[in-house]
Amino acid sequence: MDSLLFVPNKTVFTHPAGYLFGVTRLQYYISRFTAVKENGDLYIDNGFHYIDALIPENNTLVLSNLPQGKYKEITFAVGLDSLLNQTDKLPTTVENLNMAWPILMGGGYHFVKMEGVYEDATGNHGYAVHIGRNENVIRIRIPNTGIQIEPGENRISLSMNITEWFKNPVIYDFNVDGNYTMGNPVAMSKIKKNAEDIFTK
Amino acid sequence: MPKISLLNKILISLFLITVVLWQCARDHEPAKNNLTPYPFLVPKGFPSPYLSANNPMTVEGVLLGRKLFYDNILSSNGRSCNSCHLQENSFMVKNSDNYLDPNIYLNIPPLINLAWNPDFGWYGVEPDLDHIAVGDFGPLFFNSDMKKVISNVKSNSEYAQLYQKVFPDEEVFTENYFADKTAQAIAQFLRSIVSASSRYDKFMMGKAVFSQEEQYGFELFNSEKGDCFHCHSAPLFTDNLYHNIGVDSVFNVAFNSGRYLITSNPIDFGKFSTPTLRNIALTGPYMHDGRFATLDEAIEHYNSKVHSTSSLDPIMTKNNKSTKLNLTAFDKLCIKKFLETLTDSLLLSNPNYGKPK
């Protein structure tokens, strides 16, 4: 396992297209969390959760009443379902207001805001991967989790492989596909498909 | 770009799973000494304000702060808060009006909707509104002689009674407490100044119509073409974050270093807090140092004059690595027309924010 602690604004990644990039913002919603026990029992969390990956106190998701036991699979969505993804549907917190997708552009919320800087042969450039719209909800399924919730245990850590946003099944190259995804449904669709395997246990 | 290590995985402690029973409600403390809780009304669609647990707003506290704001009793040079922060200017300070050293070119944002600010100053130098007025007692502004100020306040029966009512448990007329408590009272008044009655607000409630130019400007504001909404998000028209929007290409003037002055992180060079756009038509000049005299100049900056530096906010770089918006003259005019709909004329003459009689 080569998971390492991410240092906001400092850690540099190698993009599959061959250049370096960093992350200065990574905010997203998680919703529709489910966990399936080995015996088939199903836990469902119907809430939505705002995550700011760069702020340690904001990158945990609190679930209540998850029973002890061994879980074989967890699933969740990065994004919001169509019932929640409507303008003014979420509580008016600063975070939700900052994630709003203008009503004049279809309304609802950004599912993901991922921003940073990449460095290619011509210099440093900003990129802004913003994902929204109902068709771009990212479905995450983590099978064979081996997660065992013991008495007194209350934390599960998942790893996000940042570079997976930009590869598998296709390489998303800022210089080819666009360093700015809003208003670009093709770009958003590529990122959405790539992102389905960003998380691992 | 910093080059520290080539890592390709983030460990994110994503799921904290707990069986804790939540206690959502918090009992409100009853007001002390018959003080009346201030009825702070959150406008529809606004987030919860940052109200101070250590300095709860009361009707009496807001009144004391408001009286002090308009009174030169705190200074030794005849100045009061409203010598610079004029209600008709949305309580902002224009460069030409302030008392700062002319070599310190500083633009003071309007004192509106401060109840929603998580911190204060262009680069977040002050985390607490309750404390912010203390700085005004120094030589640069009020040059206050605290012993004399306390004596004058104590000999004024109206002030003496108000101070003792608002701060009953404190030795408020001792030098240790007086400046802090006075700043708290002023902070209560400042938190009470709410701007949410512009024509834009009426439009959003279906009680006003936009002209064709305003409507098009509204659309541009909320589009990728104009791309104002990402940072100036409604209804506060600020995201309360820090951004380098490319007004400088080098940071050899200390103040222009922005948030870097707090964090010492090079990625924060040139980052300043996003100011609200409410009442923006009244609060020129623009940017942290007031370098743009008009809204037209400010809009043109975003359109064609963004400097690309290593700390430039990523959102300022559009596709094809361009930092230009390519707006037409008509586009820019319409954005300005829309911004003018954010003027809250009621606030400018609201007697609740004016000099008490």
Image (cartoon, rainbow, N blue to C red):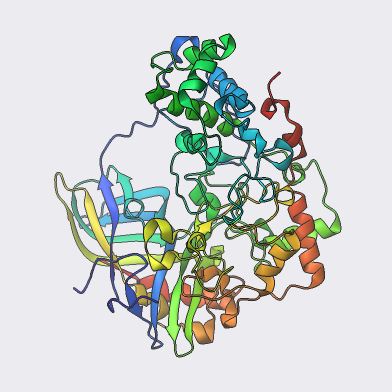
Instruction: Report how many numbered discs are placed on residues in the image.
Output: 0
Q: From the viewer's perspective, is A149 left or right of B184?
A: left
Residue A71 drawn above or below residue A154: below
Examine the image and state in which quarter residue B84 appears. top right
Picture residue at 49% right of the left edge, 69% below the top:
B251
Residue B15 drawn above or below residue B223: above
Q: From the viewer's perspective, is A156 left or right of A110?
A: left
* Percent position of residue B291, x then y: 65, 61
Residue placed farthest to the right in the image? B211
**Rendered-image quadrant of the C terminus of chain B:** top right
**Rendered-image quadrant of the N terminus of chain B:** bottom left
Picture residue at 17% right of the left edge, 48% below the top:
A153
Residue B282 drawn above or below residue B348: below
* Percent position of residue A42, x then y: 30, 52
Front residue (pair B183, B22): B183
Front residue (pair B200, B91): B91
Picture residue at 58% right of the left edge, 83% below the top:
B320
Q: From the viewer's perspective, is B259 left or right of A60?
A: right
* Percent position of residue B58, x then y: 53, 21
Residue A28 drawn above or below residue B78: below
Residue placed farthest to the left in the image? A151
